Image: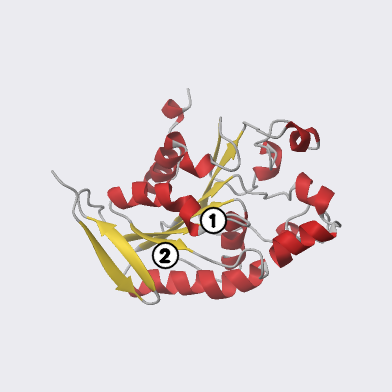
Amino acid sequence: MHEKTEDVRVGFFIVTTANQIRLDTNECVILLHGLGRFRQSMGRLEQHLKRLGYTTINLAYPSTTKSIETIAGTHLARAVHSCEASGAEKIHFVGHSLGGIIVRQYLQQHFVPAGSRLVMLSPPNQGSELVELLLNFPLYQWITGPAGQEIGRGPEALVHRLKPVEIEVGVIAGTSSMNPLFSFFMDGPDDGMVSVKSTELAEMSDFITVPSTHTFIMRSPMVMKQVAHFFKYGRFDRRMTS
């Protein structure tokens, strides 16, 4: 059977729905890329979720020119409104690295429908050791912009001011590094950019590690399946990692 897809305009966005596999409800997934990345980096994961019947918004946002609060209150808020306008009964999020922190910021002041869930891929929930190391370098400041200054480990870092979110959260951390120099400055296993320890969140519902690097974790077939499993069941599938 051929998969039938259709493009639908929802507010400012073009979203695609896949009709081969139907969900019990109309569920929308908003995907957020990481710092300095583009929406295309989440494209393979988006296609996987489309095939499962989710309506998707693969959000493009100015990760290197705006603050986390500004991105959450404008770009992400507009995407959530579009999901609401489409009649979504659940609004899920999957954020890579900085993308997950933006969702946490949004949820400080906003609510989403019951049953909505968030999957964070390699998020610096406790702040990034690497960012803390580079924070005072002008080149880093110029490349990463305001948001890049907010994810360090110091007491003034935004991640330490965020309150627990009222949504089920699943965290997936990578354990493979292609950069031994960066890994040297991190505590314990890491993915080349973020240590496993720094990804943990007090209120997370579930947590797993996968043998992936920070850069490509969202493209891992195992990760894509785990994201969908968490959206459906609120937990990860341990059988995939054993």
From this view, report whether residue 218 is shown above or below residue 145: above
- Contact (CB < 8 A) between labels 2 and 1? no
Graded by Cα atoms within 10 Å as few (under 14), some (14 to 19) or many (20 or more), the crowding at tag 1 reads: many
* Quadrant hosting residue 67: bottom right
* Residue 229, quarter of the rendered image: top left
Tell which of 127 and 6 is nearer to you. Answer: 6
Task: Tell which of 50 and 101 is nearer to you.
Answer: 50
The residue pinned by badge 1 equals 33
Q: CA distance from mark 2 to mark 1?
A: 23 Å
Q: Let me know if residue 3 appears in the view.
A: yes
Above or below, 207 against 63 in this view is: above
Decide if residue 199 is on the left or right side of residue 22: right
- Which residue ends up furthest to the left in the rendered image? 1
Q: Earlier in the sequence, mark 2 or mark 1?
A: 1
Q: Position of residue 122 (x, y in %)?
A: 60, 44
Tag 2 residue: 113
- SS for dot 1: loop
Q: How many marks?
A: 2
Q: Position of residue 58 (x, y in %)?
A: 44, 60
**Which amino acid, mark 1?**
His
Name which residue lies at 86% across and 57% down: 136
Image quadrant occupied by the N terminus: top left
As displayed, is residue 9 above or below residue 242? below
User: Disc 2 vs disc 1: which is toward the camera?
Assistant: 1
Amino acid type indicated by mark 2: Pro
**In the image: residue 206, left or right of residue 79:** right
Q: Position of residue 154 (x, y in %)?
A: 83, 54
- Picture residue at 83% right of the left edge, 57% below the top: 155
Secondary element type, mark 2: loop
